[in-house]
Image (spheres, grey):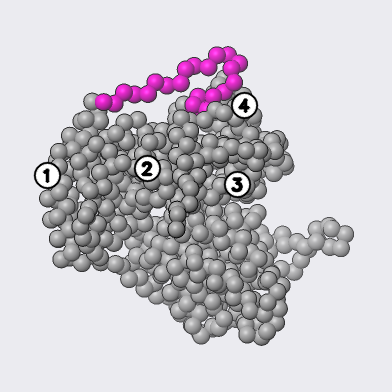
């Protein structure tokens, strides 16, 4: 059968199971489990175990088969998981499904972060955990995915269907016979919730949840009673699964025409208008339309920090990241002196605006949201899809490169960092000078919370070089799990993760999963002895953390089993040698490079950022 793939989503007929190339063969994994299944005897030794894995099938016959097949059909080839007593039978079906790889993570939080990273690349991700004790550990990662408009399918192995309403107190709960706390928690961070406690409507529930996930581009929650997974049922026995019923949104044509006319009048009368792209370009599937507009109008083009990588930085009119006082060189000045602007997909939250300190001319700014257009001091028009508006306005604007020409006139390239003296302690700007040299079309940069935010924003991304950041939710430690997931989704790319020691201590365990999966990520662990971003907002002894022997920890995870190379560096010369090795004879390994940096060595942007946030956090209370 044929398939149409649009930004990671299958929008037409369902593909064959082999259409999505698996990272690891699910059948091979099942065969391996059948032949090597082991348990622990009373003496702690490994002993054979009579584990039975369901055989691969071509036709779904049980709920477990059906869900596994649906996941493959929407483009998922990896599920990030942690086993528990209520999801084990379901996991058997995931293992047996052709083209589906069950990735075991060290904890639920990292499994959720991995699904987040996977969804950024594939357009949809999935994770599977056990009831309550597992899912509530997962929920922080799902909240972050919600903030980033990432379609993630959260699958929970639920209690036996007979226990609902039975007044029994179950393990993994908080000790009350009403164990609906999990559902109530997920109602706040998912766009749809399904509890499958019978087989009669299970097929509809699964399809409804997946459809909502794809339509809304938000996480969904599916809880499946553990005793239903393996029971055959006629609703799962169709020879061919029907396509998912998606309801694509449409623009109101009259509203679109009025909005385009009004926007054209404002922008064509301006002297030096600019364009700014935001992170909502991705969920709105409007990146191509934004590019079309940039090519047509020739305005200076900036992005907000969360949208870095969503617009090509080699574009002739790209001017950098607009981030208020911590913008890249001369970008902020160009945007803020513009006499008209169009913000497409920008989320102007506290972090994107450096504590709401942006000074662009709000009375001359058109805000294009996912489904409406908002004009300054005037009406908003909708429903209008972002991509429809951008494509339509591109045909109405007069080319006007004035703002870009002004930018080029005032732009003075920042001089690179001075060459280090032999044996001199490594400086952070020297580190990122060499990371810049590593970048190519097959690299994806993952930026963790902290000074890496600001250092990575200054990197110039070559064509097809990827970039990911989680700015709004800003969950410290997110990047390690996200790197794991993104690498599984894009095996043709190589991840470069920039993470501080404080963030690494939050989520280090799944470096071992990367090694197990034979990923060749390059991890720069920037060791400066604490939470540097917090230091610049408000310092105290709580920002100092125990120093670990990080390379020794990763070596212990490696444990002489897998491809892994580690090193600890103190100087520029050692850094150059480490990068040459990581890009050369260790290119097929996971490379862990611990970089020793002075505690007070930070970017000037972080100092400015910290000062702004210290001021906004210390505002006195309003008088009643």
- Give the residue at the far right of this rendering: 43
Mark positioned earlier in the residue sequence (4 or 2): 2
What residue is rendered at 33% in x and 66% in y?
Answer: 12
What residue is rendered at 22% in x and 39% in y?
Answer: 338
Mark positioned earlier in the residue sequence (1 or 3): 1
What residue is rendered at 21% in x and 60% in y?
Answer: 379
Q: State the extent of the magenta-drawn residues as a range.
A: 410-432
| Numbered badge on residue 569 | 4
Q: In the rendered structure, are the residues bearing label 4 and label 1 in contact, judged by CB atoms less than 8 Å apart?
A: no
Disc 2: which residue: 357
The x, y position of residue 32, in whole percent, is 66, 59
Mark positioned earlier in the residue sequence (3 or 4): 3
Question: Which mark lies nearer to you, 4 or 2?
Answer: 2
Q: Please tell me in which quadrant of the rendered image residue 325 appears.
A: top left
Disc 1: which residue: 269
| Numbered badge on residue 514 | 3
Q: In the rendered structure, are the residues bearing label 1 and label 3 in contact, judged by CB atoms less than 8 Å apart?
A: no
In this view, 218 is above or below 410: below
Mark positioned earlier in the residue sequence (1 or 2): 1
Report the front residue among 113 and 351.
351
Question: Which mark lies nearer to you, 1 or 2?
Answer: 2
Looking at the rendered structure, the secondary structure element under dot 3 is helix
**Separation of disc 4 and disc 2 at Cα?**
38 Å
**Separation of disc 1 and disc 2 at Cα?**
27 Å
């Amino acid at each position: 059968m044929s398939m149409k793939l649009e930004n990671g989503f299958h929008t037409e007929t369902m593909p064959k199971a082999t259409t999505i190339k698996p990272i690891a063969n699910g059948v091979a994994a099942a065969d391996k489990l059948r032949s090597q299944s082991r348990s622990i005897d009373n003496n702690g030794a490994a002993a054979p175990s009579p584990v039975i894995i369901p055989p691969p099938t071509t036709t779904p016959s049980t709920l477990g088969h059906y869900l596994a097949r649906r996941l493959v059909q929407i483009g998922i080839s990896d599920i990030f998981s942690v086993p528990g007593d209520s999801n084990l039978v379901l996991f058997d079906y995931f293992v047996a499904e052709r083209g589906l790889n069950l990735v075991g993570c060290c904890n639920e939080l990292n499994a959720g972060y991995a699904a987040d990273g996977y969804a950024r690349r594939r357009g949809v991700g999935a994770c599977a955990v056990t009831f309550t004790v597992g899912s509530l550990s997962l929920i922080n990662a799902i909240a972050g995915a919600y903030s980033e408009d990432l379609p993630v399918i959260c699958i929970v192995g639920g209690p036996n269907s007979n226990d609902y309403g039975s007044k029994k107190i179950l393990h993994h709960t908080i000790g009350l016979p009403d164990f609906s706390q999990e559902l109530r928690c997920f109602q706040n961070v998912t766009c749809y919730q399904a509890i499958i406690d019978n087989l009669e409507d299970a097929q509809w529930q699964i399809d409804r949840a997946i459809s909502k996930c794809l339509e809304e581009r938000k996480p969904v929650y599916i809880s499946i009673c553990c005793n239903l997974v393996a029971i055959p049922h006629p609703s799962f026995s169709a020879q061919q699964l029907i396509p998912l019923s998606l309801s694509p949104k449409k623009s109101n044509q009259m509203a679109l025409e009025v909005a385009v006319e009004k926007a054209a009048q404002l922008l064509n009368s301006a002297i030096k208008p600019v364009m700014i792209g935001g992170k909502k370009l991705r969920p709105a599937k409007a990146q191509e339309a934004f590019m079309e507009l940039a090519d047509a109008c020739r305005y200076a083009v900036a992005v907000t920090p969360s949208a870095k990588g969503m617009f090509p930085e080699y574009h002739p009119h790209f001017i950098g990241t607009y981030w208020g006082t911590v913008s890249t060189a001369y970008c902020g000045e160009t945007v803020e002196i513009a006499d008209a602007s169009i913000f497409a997909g920008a989320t102007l939250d506290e972090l994107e605006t450096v504590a709401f300190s942006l000074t662009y001319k709000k009375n001359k700014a058109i805000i294009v949201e996912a489904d409406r257009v908002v004009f300054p001091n005037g009406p908003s028009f909708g429903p209008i899809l972002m991509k429809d508006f951008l494509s339509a306005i591109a045909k109405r604007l007069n080319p006007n490169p004035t703002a870009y020409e002004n930018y080029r006139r005032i732009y003075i390239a920042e001089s690179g960092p001075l060459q280090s003296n032999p044996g001199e302690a490594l400086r952070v700007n020297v580190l990122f000078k060499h990371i810049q040299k590593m970048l190519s079309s097959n690299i994806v940069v993952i930026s963790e919370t902290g000074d890496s935010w600001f250092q990575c924003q200054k990197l110039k991304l070559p064509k097809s070089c990827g970039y990911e950041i989680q700015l709004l939710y800003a969950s410290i430690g997110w990047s390690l799990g996200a790197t794991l997931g993104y690498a599984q989704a894009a095996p043709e790319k190589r991840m470069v993760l920039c993470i501080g020691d404080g963030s690494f201590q939050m989520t280090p365990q799944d470096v071992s999963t990367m090694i197990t999966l034979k990923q060749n990520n390059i991890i720069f662990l920037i060791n400066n002895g604490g939470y540097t971003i917090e230091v610049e907002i408000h310092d105290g002894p709580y920002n100092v953390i125990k120093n670990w022997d990080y390379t020794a920890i990763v070596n212990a995870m490696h444990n002489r089993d897998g491809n892994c190379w580690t090193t600890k560096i103190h100087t520029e010369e050692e850094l150059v040698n480490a990068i040459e090795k990581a890009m050369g004879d260790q290119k097929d390994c996971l490379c862990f490079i611990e970089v020793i940096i002075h505690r007070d060595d930070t970017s000037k942007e972080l100092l400015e950022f910290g000062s702004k946030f210290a001021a906004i956090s210390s505002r006195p209370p309003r008088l009643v």
